[in-house]
Image (spheres, coloured by chain):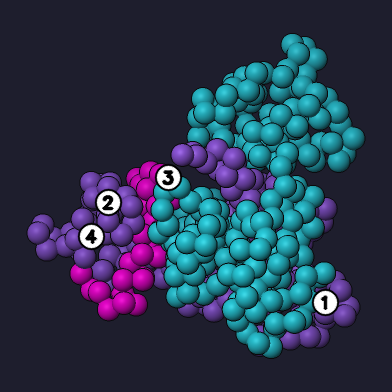
Chain colours: A purple, B cyan
Amino acid sequence: MEKKISSAVIKRLPRYYRYLSELLENGIDRISSQELSHKMNVTASQIRQDFNNFGGFGQQGYGYNVEILRGEIGKILGLDKKYHVIILGAGNLGQALANYTGFARRGFLVSAIFDNDIKKVGQKVGDIIVRDMAALEDYIQENSVDIVALTLPKSKAPEVAGELVKMGVHAFWNFAATDLNLPEDVVVENVHLAESLMRLSYNIVNLPHD
Amino acid sequence: MEKKISSAVIKRLPRYYRYLSELLENGIDRISSQELSHKMNVTASQIRQDFNNFGGFGQQGYGYNVEILRGEIGKILGLDKKYHVIILGAGNLGQALANYTGFARRGFLVSAIFDNDIKKVGQKVGDIIVRDMAALEDYIQENSVDIVALTLPKSKAPEVAGELVKMGVHAFWNFAATDLNLPEDVVVENVHLAESLMRLSYNIVNLPHD
């Protein structure tokens, strides 16, 4: 079923999931497409079309059951599974990721963090001890690793990622400001903060003035 | 001139800028659309079309002057200006942003960082002293603030952002996992890490297996 859903719809799913989660947190268990539309700043017909892709959970004149809809979207997004995440780089960004409890709540469990700075090795980030990067290969052979989060300098990230692929890693969450150039069967999700900042400055420069 | 460029092209510009910067760092001052195409995994005709939007800097059979092209794209992105950035939240993520030298290199200057945790106030993040959030309004009235980076909990971010808009702030780099719902003349660039992680898990679940 997932294969039929267009990539444009897929891109919107995480945002729907976030909104539906917020509704549940606020004790709202039913919502119409009009209300959701108003909250999310998306047209109601867009929402209905998107939800029809996975069966259309709405009941005319009654609205969506928030918990069921969230569960179905979560399944499509793979959030009904657990993922073991390791983080390479114990700098501020690596520590921020390790400490963010929202990830664990969604099934992303940080099981180890690695750094090659001997001063950081052995220190704790939350409950997790920073390990020596030299122990990385052994760790991957002995443990299940579903996702590697890369918070390494861009000069090192592509080479390290290439070696990790040889060790059997298939998915990367890449914060290094460079592309990894990995085989097509490897999943890479890039978070290029510098590019995000450039979109911001573009919009500042092009902000309509009165 | 910028107004005529489609948003799809605009979205690609930061990536072009990043690649052209890497070429310059590697001492490459001229490149053909074919070579750039190969490096960036975009078709050469796409690249030529995109660059034609701002005058087409190529010289047939000779390629693009990397420095000039990078400069022109930088201007369109507003990177020929300086931006004063303040960071709200001195947690790991706020500290990571404050310490990232790549931003300063591109004209984004972190001038202050604020937190309401009295244990953090007065401490240094790089060269910047963490200030008390209670001093935020005075700071904004006395200093030029072009961008506010929000690394606050999602329960606080929308309210704080709304107050900042009243104080005259027009641009936000939002890391809180929620939308800010600000007036249309305010620029918001969202970095929703949880949504990024959901796109990753979707792609893991839907990875073609052999």
- Tell if the residue under mark 2 belongs to the same chain as the one under mark 1: yes
Distance of mark 4 from mark 2, alpha carbons?
11 Å
Q: Nearest to the eye among marks 1 and 4: give it.
A: 4
In the image, what residue type sits under mark 4? Glu
Q: Can residue A158 be seen in this view?
A: no
Report the residue at 57% width, 65% height from top.
B150
In the image, residue A169 above or below residue B108: below
Tell which circle, 4 or 2, labels the residue nearer the N-terminal end.
Answer: 4
Distance of mark 1 from mark 4, alpha carbons?
51 Å
Callout 3: helix, strand or loop? helix
In the image, what residue type sits under mark 1? Asp
In the image, residue B20 above or below residue B55: below
- Residue that mark 2 sits on: A47
Q: Do the residues labelled 2 and 1 touch (CB within 8 Å)?
A: no
In the image, residue B64 above or below residue A67: above
In the image, residue B147 above or below residue B151: above
Distance of mark 2 from mark 3, alpha carbons?
15 Å
- Residue that mark 3 sits on: A7
Q: Give the range drawn in magenta.
A: A1-30
Q: Nearest to the eye among marks 3 and 4: give it.
A: 4
In the image, what residue type sits under mark 2? Ile
Query: Which subunit holds the residue at mark 1?
Result: A
Callout 4: helix, strand or loop? helix
- Residue that mark 4 sits on: A35
Left of A145 or right of it: where is A166?
A: right
Magenta: main secondary structure equals: helix
In the image, what residue type sits under mark 3? Ser
Q: Which mark is residue A132?
A: 1
